[in-house]
Image (cartoon, helix red, strand yellow):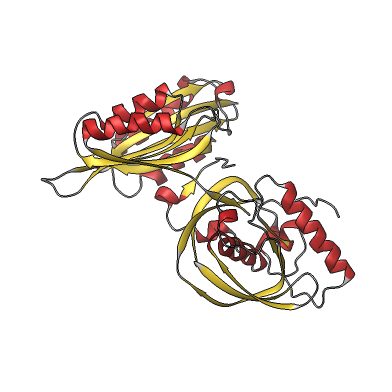
């Protein structure tokens, strides 16, 4: 396993759409291991997507269990989601998000309160996952990366929603 | 290379940003940082600008003469020392949001700011507005602050309690939670 360099905006790879993974091969497993390690190496990092390390493949990794608030909410611990699809979503929540690919920026983004996701796990087994709160935000943020969408595309208002060059750790 | 602070204030109408940034573009200035908003019908711009050659106010200030004359804007330029220009926050601490609101009366901002200063709490953003009906004005202040690690929240809460009683305002303090993704 290795910590991979994070692609930073304006790297064009971040605006690309990722391709589905054909199967969880040894090579895909190795990439997943690297993603987990890369996420954990970032202070406060609770999620990462394959395109953030330059791999345009539909893989995301989320773990909010160590987060101050996320850890207190219901969560699945380490979640590896390959080819994730949202089956259903509902409710609203506004959460301040930051992104490793756009350092030093945080912004309030509106997301669904809960999501129902269909995906393959790290072993290639199909799983249906229901997620709430911060974990659901992390899943939605990372799934946006698979479409080439950044959280800046979802900021709703300049007046209070964009917090400039501040670190919240 | 010189850095300047630039402030522009004038009666709000379309075209102010276009006119000011046209001057900046044509004189070769780079906008490093900026925030602009409407305050009581006045459009207010505060910018940090950089110029590759100019380093004194005298070199850059005359460029704004047309904007002053044609648009009636108040424009002021000040020199910034290179070591004063930073992209990082100067003070660290735990980020919090504080909301203060109540019937409008003198001293609300000062009372809160005075206690924050006493505890070395750094204000990083501050927004105040008078809202509500004309005959029942309500003062609303929202602050973003960094509270130093060594400050006990109970001490701060005790000070806020005094202000709550003295000025009949509501004050709520909560940590800013963010997700790094």
- Res. A85 image quadrant: bottom right
- For the N terminus of chain A, the quadrant is bottom right
Q: Residue at x 75, y 69 (%)?
A: A57
Q: Residue at x 61, y 65 (%)?
A: A139
Residue B136 coordinates in the image, percent (x, y): 13, 45
Q: Is residue B155 left or right of residue A121?
A: left
When the figure is inspected, residue A149 is found, relative to residue A9, above or below; the finding is below
- Res. B114 image quadrant: top left
Q: Is residue A13 left or right of residue B109?
A: right
Residue B111 coordinates in the image, percent (x, y): 30, 27
Q: Residue at x 79, y 63 (%)?
A: A32
Query: Depth check: A143 or B98 in front?
Result: B98
When the figure is inspected, residue A71 is found, relative to residue B142, above or below; the finding is below
Residue B62 coordinates in the image, percent (x, y): 42, 26
When the figure is inspected, residue A94 is found, relative to residue B120, above or below; the finding is below
Query: Depth check: B19 or A43 in front?
Result: A43
Q: Is residue B163 left or right of residue B24?
A: left
- For the C terminus of chain A, the quadrant is top right
Residue B117 seen from this side = yes
When the figure is inspected, residue B176 is found, relative to residue A112, above or below; the finding is above
- Res. B104 image quadrant: top left
Q: Give the residue furthest to the left.
A: B135
């Amino acid at each position: 396993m290795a910590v991979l360099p994070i692609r930073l905006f304006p790297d064009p790879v971040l605006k690309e759409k990722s391709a589905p993974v054909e199967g969880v091969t040894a090579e895909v497993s190795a990439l997943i291991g690297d993603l987990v390690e890369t996420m954990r190496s970032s202070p406060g990092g609770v999620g990462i997507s394959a395109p953030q390390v330059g791999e345009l493949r539909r893989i995301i990794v989320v773990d909010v269990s160590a987060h101050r608030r996320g850890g207190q909410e219901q969560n699945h611990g380490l979640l590896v989601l390959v080819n994730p699809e949202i089956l259903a979503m509902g409710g609203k929540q506004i959460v301040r998000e930051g992104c490793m690919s756009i350092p030093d920026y945080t912004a309030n983004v509106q997301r669904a309160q809960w999501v129902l996701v269909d995906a393959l796990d790290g072993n290639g087994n199909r799983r249906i996952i229901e997620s709430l709160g911060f974990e659901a935000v992390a899943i939605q943020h990372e799934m946006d990366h698979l479409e080439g969408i950044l959280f800046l595309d979802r900021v709703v208002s300049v007046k209070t929603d964009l917090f400039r060059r501040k670190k919240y750790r | 290379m010189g850095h300047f602070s630039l402030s522009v204030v004038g009666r709000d109408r379309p075209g102010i940003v276009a006119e000011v940034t046209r001057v900046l573009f044509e004189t070769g200035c780079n906008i490093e940082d900026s925030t602009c908003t409407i305050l009581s019908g006045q459009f207010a711009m505060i910018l940090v600008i950089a110029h590759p050659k100019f380093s004194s106010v005298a070199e850059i200030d005359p460029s704004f003469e047309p904007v002053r004359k044609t648009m009636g804007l108040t424009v002021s330029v000040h020199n910034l020392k290179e070591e004063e220009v930073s992209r990082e926050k100067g003070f660290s601490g735990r980020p919090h949001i504080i909301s203060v609101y109540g019937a409008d009366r003198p001293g609300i901002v000062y009372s809160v700011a005075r206690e924050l200063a006493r505890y070395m709490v750094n204000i990083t953003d501050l927004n105040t507005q008078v809202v509500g009906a004309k005959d029942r004005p309500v003062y609303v202040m929202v602050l973003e602050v960094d509270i130093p690690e060594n400050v006990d929240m109970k001490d701060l809460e005790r000070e806020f309690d005094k202000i709550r009683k003295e000025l009949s305002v509501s004050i709520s303090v909560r940590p800013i939670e963010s997700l790094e993704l």
